[in-house]
Amino acid sequence: MTDATLRVEFAAQPAAIRVRGYWGTVGRRLRYDYVTLFFLAVILMIVFAAIAAPLIAPFDPNKTSMAFRLKPIGFRDFRLGTDELGRDMLSRLIWGGRMSLLMGLVPVVVATAIGGTLGVIAGFVGGKLNMLIMRTMDIFYAFPSVLLAIAISGMMGGGMYNGLIALSMVFIPPLCRIAETATTQVRHLDFVEAARASGASSGSIILHHVVGNVLAPVLIYASSLISVSVLLSAGLSFLGLGVEPPTPDWGLMLSTLRQAIYVQPLVCALPGAAIFITSLSFNLVSDGLRHAMDVRI
Amino acid sequence: MTSSCWHAEFKKLMWAYAGRRIIYAVPIAIGVTVICFGLVFLAPGDPMVNLLPPDASPADAAYLRKLYGFDQPVPVQYAKWLLRAVTGDLGTSLQTGRPVISEVGRALSNTIVISLGAVLLAFSLAFVLGTLAGYYAGRPADRALTAVSVVGVSVPNYWLGMVLIIVFSVELGVLPATGMGSAGSDTFSLFNWEQAKYAILPVITLSMVPLGIIMRNTRAAIAEVLANDFVQTLRAKGLPETMVIRHAVRNAFPQVLAVMGLQFGYLVGGSILIETIFTWPGTGFLLSKAILTRDIPVLQGAILVLAMCFVATNLAVDLLQTAIDPRIRRA
Amino acid sequence: MTAEFVAAAVVLAASTVALPAKAETVLRVAMTAGDIPDWTGQPDQGFEGYRFVGWSLYDALINWDLSRSDVEAGLTPGLAVKWGIDPANNKRWVFELRKDVKFHDDCKLDADLVVWNIQRLIDDKTPGFNPVQYSRHRSRSINVERAEKIDDGKVAIYTKTPDSFLPYNVSVWYMISKCAMEKANFDNALYAKAPAGTGPYKFDKVVPRERLELTKNADYWNPKRVPKHDRLVLIPMPEATTRAAALLAGQVDFIEAPSPDTIPRLKSSGMRVITLPYPHNWHYQLNFVEPPFNDVRVRRAANHALNRAEMVEMLGGIAQEGYATYPPNAKLYGNPVKYEYDPAKATALLKEAGCHPCAITFAISTSGSGQMQPLPMNELVKAQLEAVGFKVKLDVMDWNTLLDVSFKGREKYPQYNGINISRATQDPPNGLLRFVMKQQWSPNGGNWGWYENQEIEDIVAEAMRTFDDEIRDILMTKVHEIASREAIMLFVTHDLNPRALSPRVHGFVQAQSWFQDLTPITIVEGGK
């Protein structure tokens, strides 16, 4: 999960990749990348299950039953068994996907918006402002991501919102740095100089050229953060710093089911497996996208 | 220009670069102290309540707050804390009354044991597997090996730790489940199997992420070297494949070593979940306790020391890497 | 090679050979505490600190009799052989000290030392005054005015107001060696390296945050309680799964509070799991000012809504159904109203009170001392309350934050209708009175939700002046019955405090108390 703040060796792509047909090429490459397509399908299934949870979950995820607690996989109608309060595991896993996806996606989206904007501004304006923004980011960079996330949410007292804030703060610096590097490199490219010379306003330069060239690396990097975010947020819940019960959440389920690991080890391992599959899928899809879009981060 | 003169010039440049990097680290370090100090003011609740039984009164808490100086204005607290921190005094733990610096120092050395173990284990495996993957880039073997590295970074390691405890400690009974040595960390020794076996499960669990990342980087580095035109030329000239691999490995090595150094930095600061699972008395364990009990001096001290270690590791890796291979200079 | 070297080598060889002949017997205990309790006097980490560290290293003037399982543990002479109220002054207690008691460092127990031990926790001018332990002990010492030497063998303790409950407070007031403190220059950190008490175990060594090692005190003043093993190792392990794994992996011999779900597995691996009622109460303290719990009908409705049998079943039978502040085996139990599970009645009461659906918010924690399995238990309570017409919001926080809510009280946290903090009910002032007396209104005491009842106030005032224990107990029983009738809490369960012992451990007698005596334990290699 430390992959989030991997030092980035970003080699700017020549503007040439923006020629017509680029997206066509990307699409063609993806179409033959069966691994990526498969895991994309897995993600779509998880997303669909999460959205349609009220319709497809066989039971109420919060309906407890002492008579049916900690039943094994395949017990009666409980396809994946039951948890320590006799709640249906399958239903809770389906509902839990909502929280895990939320905690995986929201911080990345927020951080991409904030970090990306800051990075583009720093790269485009340069000078003192660049110094100010980037040096501030460097300070946050001086903390390992896991440490920073746990320290922030731990200090704020846990809970879903604090977890979201903590994770967003962790992801802002690397995204900002990527955006800044890309912007700085693009800014000095000939076509931007040319546009500037022809009297185009800064706003339209940013809009038309810079954002277009910066977006790809930023989005690719952001996509690789989703898996990290899923793992980290589940880790926060696992430590009791994330989502609050009885909300179904994979990290939290893993943490409470740990007590029952001697009774139903397989059932107890399910939330961990769900986290693993989700994180794995996002990682592989992100890799596939990077490959197809030919962006080196 | 003679060669020796060029060398001197180069050396001068190197030193100038190193100097710049070190000076550049100073404002970062100051920023880090501000954040470490500021973090704890995010905390809801009163740090004093944990020192008292549930039936104590707020007057008792106020009394302690004054005793520990928490009633002073925040900038004053910061200035005092920083001045003491510079001299190596991080205050005393609210919970144990022991000096924070000795608590953190002890914990740090314990964390380094497993982090170093994990990163070395990961490196030795990842370098071999990554080289193979890079050599067979694009072929099925590459895909299979790359899958291993993706699993490494995708698996929730706190979950893996649980599974390992169940299998090896509880079911098979071959490895201990928790703690650091049968008589505590004081008597821990890596050279005594009875003690060293306590480190095995934490090291394996902790090595998963660096395994994935180092492998990915090795693969990329090797593949890049092999894709070079001159390698093709050498091959065309009949250079044996073992020599080609050797060449690629030699070129990729410094870069991968740097990745390993950075991973070590992450592990030292990011082992909190694993240390919690295995009750390993390192910095993560100390931190999670300090968070639970709101032991503010310990929190500030531990986070500060960890962040400083991380900055120092990065700096060291950067300088070493530049020294080995001047072409690579990180932005 | 010199002769000395040879001699040394021979001695060394002999000693290594001799060692296994008489192996040291070691009892390793995994505590639920997050850290090693303070071993320098008044412990922290709740009553667990007293249980394992306090009573091992130290004695109080009055101890607890922990030698029996069949009755609720009561007070017994400790370092004082006799005590009583001065017939001429109902604010002066006289304690007659035990003779010839020596501390682990050979310091002698005398009146001066006892007076110093009392004064050092109430008077900041006494050398050795420890602000943290002072604050920690405040709730016990607040009514103590001073101590005074009468003669070498007698000490008087003065209270500010007549206080018939003083012996309970003295029973957790440990006597530490003044000589050791003087040797450490009254520096607590130095004293921590060589602490000395009179208890059945002596301090040996500590690995901070990991383990505390104590050794047998063969010269303990009470020969019946000289430990039957040589060494006691105390290891903090807050996670229940970790404790179970450590026991199964043979790393410890004795674990506190295995979680219900691990118990079948522990039993099947040959571990002995023991349970016994003790004065513990897992409940919600309620807010008596804001609606809806200001209405006794709503409080009763909530109590009738709970299916406690189901709760006990979820807990794998390691709890008793809780219908009142005290468990039924407590001597002050009396004949309280029993809130049977009756969902129809609960709904009817709610409708009668005009609160249906009835929205309430509880502050709960994810873990904490004596909290049992807070998350699943709270979730079950929520489900059961909602089945009769409550609408329950659980506000989950960490233990520290919940303690803060508890300290500051309902006035500061009006958004909460109840808080879930389990309590020890070992002695009446802490177990009962602090929940119901006006003097204890938060933030001044434990009456979090500002309960007020003149009838109780009058009875308690009488009890404080009643120095005949039997009559006072009758009064306390009455308070308990009233508190139950008034549904001053949402009663849920009493813990049965499970412990799991490896087959190596023999002879442990579990007492009906928060405190336990480990000294009779013998270690038999290879089990039975």
Image (cartoon, coloured by chain):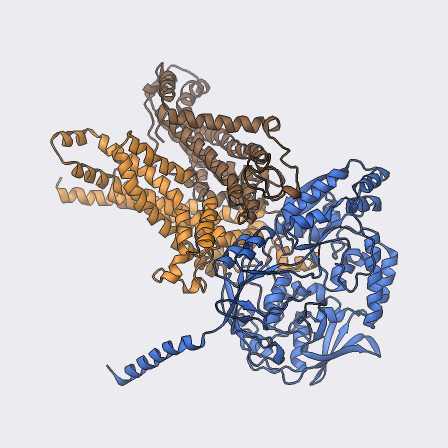
Classify residue A114 as left or right of residue C285: left
- Judging depth in this view, the residue of C403 and C333 nearest the camera is C333
- The chain coloured brown is A
- The chain coloured orange is B
- Judging depth in this view, the residue of A109 and A243 nearest the camera is A243
The reply to whether residue B310 is visible in this rendering is no
- Judging depth in this view, the residue of A77 and A51 nearest the camera is A77
- Image location of residue C290, percent across then percent down: 79, 44
Colour of chain C in the rendered structure image:
blue
- Judging depth in this view, the residue of B292 and C477 nearest the camera is C477
Whether B119 is drawn above or below C41: the answer is above
Whether B63 is drawn above or below B8: the answer is below
The reply to whether residue B172 is visible in this rendering is yes
Give the total number of marks visible in the rendering: 0
Classify residue B298 as left or right of residue B200: right
User: Which quadrant does the N terminus of chain C fall into?
Assistant: bottom left
- Image location of residue C107, percent across then percent down: 58, 81
- Image location of residue C128, percent across then percent down: 61, 72
- Image location of residue A169, percent across then percent down: 50, 38
